[in-house]
């Protein structure tokens, strides 16, 4: 049914870069056979899922939305995919994304944009816009995205679904093509909080193949989602981040956000206003740290190891082939980030830019620590505006970067955060997202609040 749905709507939505119909049907038959034989089934047996094209799946093309990886088939499964298999999930295919996860609209994909199912002239968010659109358009009930600065939560918000960024280190990065390694985290999308929690639990857990993976029990997110739905948020202290609101925010977004906060108060939560003064510098710090890490990570695309190779006719040196391949294979945003990052890390500038940004990162962590002495979770709008029109911000990188104003602090601190729908903005009737941020390894708390709101 989901493959049929993809066939029916994906020429309009363009959520998928690759549909693996054969692989999906074979997996579905394996699950059926297991069931018929009375063998034990995984927790998500037979449930279809859309996978962001930044995670490796053995033998299935992985492009990261880039021409430079065109034609590359990974020889191994990412840990996320291995866990999905253990859960008996059916993977439908790979979803569109901003090239190497750099962007907020999926317009930076080398394979054309994905469209928002609620309004095809608008963006589905990014960089995991293929995954969010697939779930919103009922092409898949579940999807996997990755979030380096907001790329799960922002697409979830603007397509009216649920998306969670687990605590950094909660889900293995093995087989996740790196953008900014100290920030990247894979996580779940679904249409309900409980479904999101079920997928979260299936992919989380310690992995010896990722040195930053946390060796501790997975937070009880499914139990928390059930608890929130049944008993609400009585006794929970919820902090409203004072810095996220006001000028630059769409009126209808703020209206729906405050209505949701009022609802949490009615459900028995104590609402506290919390100030996090360093958050003002989060965006600036992120746009030094993320490009710096990207300039190092993307050095591996040297025209020898993967995918595309341009100009290798026997007359050119390896360096010339590398230059031609990179010039043709990387898009403008990726090139901009590599140049920014290389500059920020160069000797003479390192302390002034990269070093300073890391100091700001520490201040942001401290703001969170101080806040969590007073409250159990923090909340804010997920994005300053609803989905913007395709094309509106492509020529203005700074306007595009502002889409992640509210989501970036959580990546810099490495804690857990999610977006849940909180209605539609009256002025444009488009979905609004409500962000919940919990301390590291307390992911369960945000699920409790999210489920209560639902
Ligand atoms: N939009 C942000 C960026 O372009 C975040 C992307 C992400 O989370 N992958 O870097």
Image: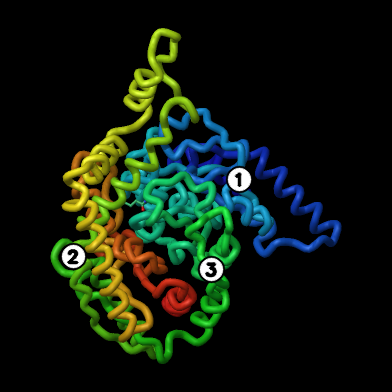
Image position, residue 142 (x, y; %): 54, 57
> Quarter of the image containing the C terminus?
bottom left
The residue at the point 36 percent across, 44 percent down is 106
Image position, residue 440 (x, y; %): 42, 72
Residue 358's quadrant in the figure? bottom left
Image position, residue 66 (x, y; %): 41, 34
In the picture of the structure, the residue carrying the numbered disc 3 is 197
- Disc 1 versus disc 3: distance between alpha carbons? 23 Å
Please say whether residue 384 is visible from this viewpoint: no
The residue at the point 24 percent across, 66 percent down is 252
Vertically, is 202 above or below 448? above
* Sooner in the amino-acid sequence: mark 3 or mark 2: 3
- Disc 2 versus disc 1: distance between alpha carbons? 39 Å
Estimate how packed mark 3 is, as few (under 14), some (14 to 19) or many (20 or more) residues with alpha carbons within 10 Å. many
Vertically, is 297 above or below 162? above
Residue 88's quadrant in the figure? bottom right
Please say whether residue 62 is visible from this viewpoint: yes
The reply to whether the C-beta atoms of the residues labelled 2 and 1 are less than 8 Å apart is: no
Q: Residue furthest left?
A: 247
């Amino acid at each position: 049914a989901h493959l049929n749905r993809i066939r029916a709507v994906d020429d309009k939505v363009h959520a998928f870069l690759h549909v693996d119909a054969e692989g999906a049907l074979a997996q579905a038959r394996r699950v059926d056979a297991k069931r018929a034989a009375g063998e034990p089934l995984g927790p998500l047996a037979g449930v279809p899922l859309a996978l962001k094209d930044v995670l490796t799946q053995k033998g299935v093309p992985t492009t990261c939305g880039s021409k430079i990886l065109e034609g590359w088939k990974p020889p191994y499964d990412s840990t996320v995919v291995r866990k999905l298999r253990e859960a008996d999930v059916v993977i439908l295919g790979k979803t569109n994304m901003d090239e190497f996860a750099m962007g907020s609209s999926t317009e930076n994909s080398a394979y054309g944009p994905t469209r928002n199912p609620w309004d095809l002239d608008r963006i589905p968010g990014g960089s995991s816009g293929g995954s969010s659109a697939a779930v919103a358009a009922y092409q898949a009930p579940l999807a996997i995205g990755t979030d380096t600065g907001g790329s799960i939560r922002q697409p979830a918000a603007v397509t009216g679904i649920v998306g969670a960024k687990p605590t950094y280190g909660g889900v293995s990065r093995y087989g996740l093509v790196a953008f900014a390694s100290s920030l990247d985290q894979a996580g779940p999308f679904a249409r309900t909080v409980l479904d999101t929690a079920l997928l979260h639990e299936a992919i989380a857990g310690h992995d010896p193949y990722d040195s930053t993976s946390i060796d501790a029990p997975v937070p009880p997110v499914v139990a928390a989602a059930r608890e929130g739905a049944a008993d609400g948020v009585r006794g929970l202290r919820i902090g409203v981040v004072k810095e996220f609101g006001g000028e630059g925010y769409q009126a209808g977004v703020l209206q729906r956000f405050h209505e949701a906060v009022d609802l949490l108060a009615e459900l028995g939560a104590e609402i506290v206003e919390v100030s996090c003064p360093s958050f003002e510098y989060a965006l600036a710090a992120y746009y030094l740290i993320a490009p710096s890490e990207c300039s190092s990570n993307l050095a591996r695309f040297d025209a020898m190891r993967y995918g595309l190779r341009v100009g290798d006719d026997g007359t050119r040196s390896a360096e010339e082939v590398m230059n031609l391949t990179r010039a043709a294979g990387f898009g403008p945003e990726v090139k901009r980030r590599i140049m920014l990052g290389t500059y920020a890390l160069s000797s003479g500038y390192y302390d002034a830019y990269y070093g300073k940004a890391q100091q700001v990162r520490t201040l942001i962590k401290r703001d969170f620590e101080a806040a969590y002495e007073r409250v159990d979770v923090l909340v804010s709008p997920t994005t300053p505006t609803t989905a913007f029109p395709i094309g509106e911000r492509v020529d203005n990188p700074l306007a595009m970067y502002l889409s992640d104003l509210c989501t970036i602090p959580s990546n810099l601190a490495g804690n857990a955060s999610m977006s849940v729908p909180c209605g539609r903005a009256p002025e444009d009737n488009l979905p609004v997202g409500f962000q919940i941020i919990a301390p590291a390894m307390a992911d369960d708390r945000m699920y409790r609040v999210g489920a209560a709101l639902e």
